[in-house]
Amino acid sequence: MGPSFDAPQAPPHRPVLYQEVLAALRPRPGQRYIDGTVGAGGHAAGVLRGSVPDGLLLGLDRDPAALEIAGAALAEFGDRVHLRHAPYTEMDGQVQRLGWQAVNGVLLDLGLSSMQLDEPSRGFALKEDGPLDMRFDPQQSLRAADLVNTWPEADLADVLFTLGEERRSKRIARAIVDARPVESTGQLAGIVAQSVGRAGGRRHPATKTFQALRMAVNDELGQLEKGLQVAVGQLETGGRLVVISFHSLEDRLVKQYFKRESMDCICPPDQPTCTCGHQARVKIVSRKAIRPSEAEIAINPRARSARMRVAEYVGQA
Ligand SMILES: C[S@@+](CC[C@H](N)C(=O)[O-])C[C@H]1O[C@@H](n2cnc3c(N)ncnc32)[C@H](O)[C@@H]1O
């Protein structure tokens, strides 16, 4: 019998695709792992349980409040766990500081946690009033209020269109600029709802606006682009990178990065001989994105948009 991978019963944040993540990472004793987005530590606990008695885990998060929760949740694993306040783009420096050479697996479970969404003071929730904040890291200076109150209307519309895939981006940007200063999440949600009307759908009309602002405040696509490169650079041959995204732009970025890094040549297809010298660094483990089952979505509706991709480091030729 292998180790038990039962997910915790009522965690503050229910880990998405829990069994699938552990099946992909294949935690084993004596190995080292990085959870670049440790959150409430749900996936991390699974990795530590799966690598009993001596597997090690480095857990990173930009949010000190998440690290506190993870610290309590993972206390039973003692010195097998190292938690650090850092973005996953800086995992290379953290790995070096621990004196590790390389790791056997890296997990990036993108976006925000239920704890962050459920705490109005963080400014992520559109159903409850709070400050227009949306920072994962409270030490960062840029807040959502800065974008909303100072960005030119055209830039605001652009962010809503690209990051929120919001078709009514121009109308919403206009309404925001007209209503300045916008101080709270409740006020912003109201402005958006008034400008586009309630379409009668299940989702609040400001859902896409909030998503776009959150992604812009935290530079989530920029983090991901850099983080993928840094993560592959930490892997031992045969080590795996697992990425769960909740946004089509993120999933596309992961898919394209894995594809490019799995090719021996990235010259234009019409070029007769290769001049790029590019060599494959990974093999794609899951051709198609892995999606949650209907059973998981029924228990955890937040999992609905999750897409998981897995790549394995093949070493430098
Ligand atoms: C979906 S939650 C992770 C949940 C976690 N897998 C669990 O089982 O509890 C995402 C976490 O990533 C953190 N985060 C977002 N962007 C980050 C980044 N660039 N670097 C490090 N942490 C980040 C957020 O603060 C949040 O706590």
Image (tube, rainbow, N blue to C red):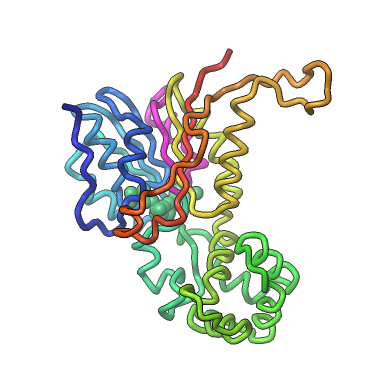
Q: Among all residues in the image, which is located at the extreme top?
A: 317
Figure disc tally: 0
Which residue is at a point 73% across and 74% down the rendered structure image? Answer: 153
Image coordinates for residue 230, horizontal then vertical, percent: 54, 34
Image coordinates for residue 178, horizontal then vertical, percent: 69, 86
Q: Is residue 153 left or right of residue 73?
A: right
Which residue is at a point 49% across and 41% down the rendered structure image? Answer: 289
Image coordinates for residue 90, horizontal then vertical, percent: 50, 40
**Camera sees residue 291:** yes
Which residue is at a point 37% across and 44% down the rendered structure image? Answer: 84
Q: Nearer the viewer, residue 51 or 142?
A: 51
The magenta region covers 86-109
Q: Among all residues in the image, which is located at the extreme front?
A: 294
Q: Is residue 235 left or right of residue 251?
A: left
Quadrant for residue 96, please give it. Answer: top left
Image coordinates for residue 200, horizontal then vertical, percent: 51, 81
Quadrant for residue 317, please give it. Answer: top right
Which residue is at a point 60% across and 21% down the rendered structure image? Answer: 280
